[in-house]
Image (cartoon, rainbow, N blue to C red):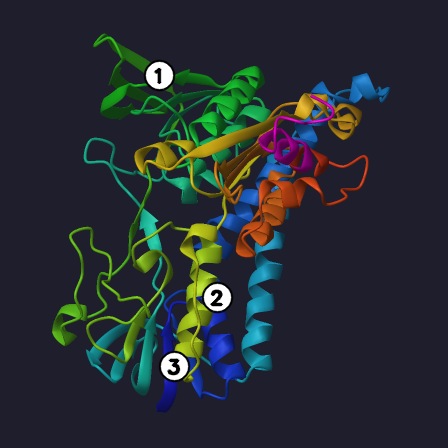
Amino acid sequence: MQFDVVVVGSGPGGYVSAIRCAQLGLKTAIVEKYNTLGGTCLNVGCIPSKALLDSSEHFHNAVHNFEQHGIEGPAPVVNMAKLIGRKDSVVDATCQGIEFLMKKNKIEVIHGSASMISDNSIEVRGSDKLKINAKNIILATGSKPIELPFAKFDKERIISSTEALKLHEIPKHLVVIGGGVIGLEMGSVYKRLGAKVTVVEYGSSIIPAMDSSCGKELQRSLRKLGIIFHMSSKVEKVTREGDVVKVESIDSKGKPFILAADYCLVAVGRKSYSEGLGLEKVGVDLDDRGRIKVNENLQTNKSNVFAIGDAVKGAMLAHKAEEEGVAVAEFIAGQKPHINYNLIPNIVYTWPEVASVGKTEDQLKEGGQSYKVGSFPMRALGRSRASTDIDGMVKILADSATDEVLGVHIVAARAADLIMEAVVAMEFRASAEDIARICHGHPTYAEAIKEAALDATDKRAIHA
């Protein structure tokens, strides 16, 4: 079988890249080792977690917030079978949508495990062994959860995010190791459903990759929800006896403590998946963290072999993988694409949501950049009071001399959607005053961005 392009992996980076290749007239195939398309994101990541987050938020509001809106009645109960079933139906529909897109774009779908034989050929082992030849190969193999040596996954009680997405009972006590995006999202789900949730984080702040003010705001909200935090604490041992998991840790003062729970979610990050691809046979270089080395065009040291998404350096974000997939397709077709990695938004889908783009305040300080800060609290916004979503803030960082927006950080209801105004503004190198002078609809959450921009522009916020 001969193709212009073969994409290995059908996650957001892989399937988007395949579609763009096909749009550009390249004969394209995609290889996926699992039975369904969509990779981690669609099957055991972004999509199912958002389905559970939404379901748990509906339940939490019904139990705790409806009464203040004048909505009264018997308290609802959780039917876990239905809740998980709805999540599964969302996943199924989304994966079927990818299959439809493959057919629509005349992309050959091949199921099986891929291994490179040479720069231009791949062996696929499925029900049969198949050799595929291609002028170009795109590796979009994604990532997998990091397993701690002292907390091995048993996939029953000591679990990764994959198992956390399909529990058929609400934990009595869920201990989450790691205060990053995955741990906080899944912790939020089960706390809303009624579990006791304890987060043990090695660092001094949660979501450490984002602006420190976001971590402080989110932690304040999650504490109000009832999540317990042990910060600057080191987990040393995780053991299981029957249905009880014991997490032994050392706190910030060096004092040992033990947490007993029925489930322990290990959420300390993910690592690139590059095993079994035969890269060593072909001589494709990896870095010291097992990621595939690429240049600015996402080419490996073999010029016709590309790698994208979680398989390479950078933030492990589905939308980053998609942009890279499109860029590689266009590069192969002779175009000159460009990705501004500084303008890829980062999002946490807790409630309130957290979203940011550009530089954090710490990064500006470290770089010696002269900057000014504008901020606005969501509780001062009429729309937030109307919906009772008053937690959070908008923070804008702008250049002291030019007023160009350097970073925007939001903790708020619908922050994931609000951040795109900042991304567009920064793509066109807008100033804080540019944003401040744009008419924003009233009453909306987006007004908080205008107010923060006004605050950054001579401290002239109207409603603060």
| Numbered mark located on residue 260 in the image | 1
Decide: marks 1, 3 in contact (CB < 8 A)? Answer: no
Query: Which quadrant of the figure has residue 333?
Result: bottom left
Q: Amino acid at mark 3?
A: Ile
Judged by depth in the image, the label closer to the viewer, 2 or 3, is 3
- Magenta-tinted stretch: 450-464
Q: Is residue 128 above or below residue 284?
A: below
Q: Is residue 25 above or below residue 312?
A: below
| Numbered mark located on residue 384 in the image | none
Q: Which quadrant, please, contains the N terminus?
A: bottom left
Q: Residue at the front extreme? A: 401
Q: Between residues 194 and 287, which one lies in front from this camera angle? A: 287
Residue at (19%, 36%) from the top-left corner? 149
Residue at (51%, 43%) from the top-left corner? 402
Q: Position of residue 177 (x, y in %)?
A: 34, 28
Left or right: 11 as drawn, with respect to 385: left
Left or right: 409 as drawn, with respect to 234: right
Query: Which quadrant of the figure has residue 387?
Result: top right
Q: Distance of mark 1 from mark 3, alpha carbons?
A: 54 Å
Judged by depth in the image, the label closer to the viewer, 1 or 3, is 3
Q: Amino acid at mark 1?
A: Ala
Instruction: Report the residue marked by disc 3.
Output: 332
Q: Residues within 10 Å of mark 1 (few under 14, many from 20)?
A: some
Residue at (48%, 65%) from the top-left corner? 36
